[in-house]
Image (cartoon, rainbow, N blue to C red):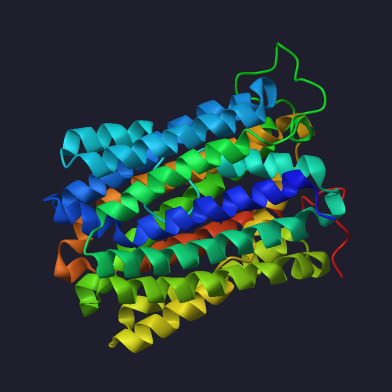
């Protein structure tokens, strides 16, 4: 029988990623329809991700001491507030303030404090031997939800002739999340409160390894920031004149493939180890990413994109499980938060450059090439730095 808290955490993940997926497909098109230039949109996305970084860092480094449930509820309220603000104004300054303070996902991926704290909570109620497998299903749930959200966002905005209704739905999801988070039990909290003298970072003896991992994860996310789902959707819109409904279908399929790929991760990790699984599944997906803009037709570009997504998520549950395995239970929220913030920070820096490139026809392919190339560098550095550092709980690879 699945524990109620596990069901609730899977529910919040599913509902949240549905909203993220719906938003990501229409966000850039919505903002440009308000009169913002591609350069302004790129800057807004960068500032939005930067704000999400600050919010996530503050909440996750305090969650293990002040309460994981409390911090999750705060994040959900900030998500609802940001959605309402984006639906209510077209003023660039107000949109920037709302995006910076609130929680907005332009990529279809996790932002804010939710993922790190949920990972720590799941690790609290799931045995270590099952953690990677549970994280794989958790990743699948999110990918399927993102896929469904992408499909729904594209079709609804096309059918209703309104992007604003999707934005309002995003805000409503934030309120739903707050209610579900409030019902989590005390079991998801750290059994013994961290000492009052705990470092502000929330990390103790694991500080060194987490900072090294955070630097590498930041590089990977910086690379991915050039092709966040909103910008990738906009690239298809510019290159092949694809309408929102078709964009929704494309990214529905992409996220379904991505989610299914995550299920293989736990089996591969048992055989090859967490780090090897991360690297050897990530490398070919990056090569495929660089091939997308080189395809001459929409059909071929979509085919390569789907092939890329079919192996792109195998590193996600293994990466998450590895972080949880190398720290103490009372450092898990902070460890996941700091590595997550590094990823958000890296992702925040790239869209402003990608927006500039997409506004220039001669540069339109460069974001994909930069993203793939930098991700290959990340894979090499991760393997060299951590393949020999195996968690004690991990079986010796066959």
Residue 347 visible within the image: yes
Q: Residue at x 82, y 27 (%)?
A: 191
Considering depth in this image, is 255 or 265 the residue closer to the camera?
255
Q: Considering the image in quadrants, where does the C terminus appear?
A: bottom right
Residue 384: quadrant of the picture? bottom right
Q: Is residue 218 above or below residue 58?
A: below
Q: Residue furthest front?
A: 160
Image coordinates of residue 63 in percent, x first then y, are 63, 27
Q: Is 163 positioned to the left or the right of 274 in the image?
A: left
Residue at image coords 62%, 64%: 140
Pick whichever, 126 or 3, lies toward us: 3
Quadrant where the N terminus lies?
Answer: bottom right
The residue drawn where x is 20% and y is 71% is 238
301 vs 19: above or below: below
The answer to whether 283 is drawn above or below residue 62 in the figure is below
Place of residue 156 in the rendered image (x, y in percent of width and height, measured from the top left)? 33, 65
Judge from the rendering whether residue 176 lies leftward or rightward of residue 80; answer left or right: right
- Quadrant of the rendered structure where residue 123 is? top right
In the image: residue 54, left or right of residue 338: left
Question: Residue 37, percent across and down?
Answer: 13, 52
Residue 367 in sight in this render: no
Which residue appears at 36% of the width and 57% of the height? 24
Q: Seen from this angle, which residue lies furthest top? A: 197
């Amino acid at each position: 029988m699945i524990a109620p808290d596990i069901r609730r955490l899977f529910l919040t993940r599913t509902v949240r990623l549905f909203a993220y997926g719906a938003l990501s497909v229409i966000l850039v098109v919505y903002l440009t329809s308000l009169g913002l230039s591609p350069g302004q949109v790129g800057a807004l996305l960068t500032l939005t991700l930067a704000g999400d970084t600050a919010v996530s860092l503050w909440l996750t480094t305090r969650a293990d001491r002040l309460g994981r449930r409390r911090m999750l509820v705060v994040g959900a309220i900030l998500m609802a507030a940001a959605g309402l603000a984006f639906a209510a104004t077209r003023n660039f300054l107000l949109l920037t303030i709302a995006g910076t303070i609130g929680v907005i996902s332009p990529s279809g991926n996790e932002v804010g404090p939710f993922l790190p704290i949920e990972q720590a909570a799941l690790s609290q109620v799931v045995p270590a031997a099952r953690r990677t497998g549970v994280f794989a299903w958790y990743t699948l749930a999110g990918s399927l939800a993102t896929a469904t959200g992408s499909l729904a966002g594209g079709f609804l905005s096309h059918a209703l002739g309104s992007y604003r209704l999707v934005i309002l739905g995003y805000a409503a999801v934030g309120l739903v999340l707050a209610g579900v988070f409030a019902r989590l039990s005390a079991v998801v909290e750290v059994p013994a409160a961290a000492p009052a003298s705990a470092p502000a970072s929330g990390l103790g003896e694991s500080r060194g390894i987490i900072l090294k991992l955070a630097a590498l994860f930041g590089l990977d996310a910086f690379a991915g920031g050039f092709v966040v789902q909103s910008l990738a959707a906009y690239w298809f819109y510019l290159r092949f004149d694809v309408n929102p409904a078709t964009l929704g279908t494309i990214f529905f399929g992409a996220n379904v493939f991505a989610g299914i790929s995550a299920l293989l991760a736990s089996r591969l990790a048992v055989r090859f180890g967490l780090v090897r699984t991360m690297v050897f599944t990530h490398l070919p997906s990056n090569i495929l990413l660089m091939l997308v803009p080189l395809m001459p037709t929409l059909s071929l570009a979509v085919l390569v994109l789907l092939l890329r997504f079919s192996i792109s998520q195998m590193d996600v549950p293994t990466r998450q499980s590895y972080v949880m395995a190398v720290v103490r239970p009372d450092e898990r929220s902070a460890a996941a938060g700091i590595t997550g913030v590094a990823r958000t920070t890296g992702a925040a820096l790239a869209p402003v450059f990608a927006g500039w490139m997409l506004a220039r026809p001669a540069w339109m392919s460069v974001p994909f090439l930069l993203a793939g190339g930098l991700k290959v560098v990340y894979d090499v550095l991760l393997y060299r730095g951590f393949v020999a550092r195996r968690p004690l709980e991990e079986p010796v690879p066959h």
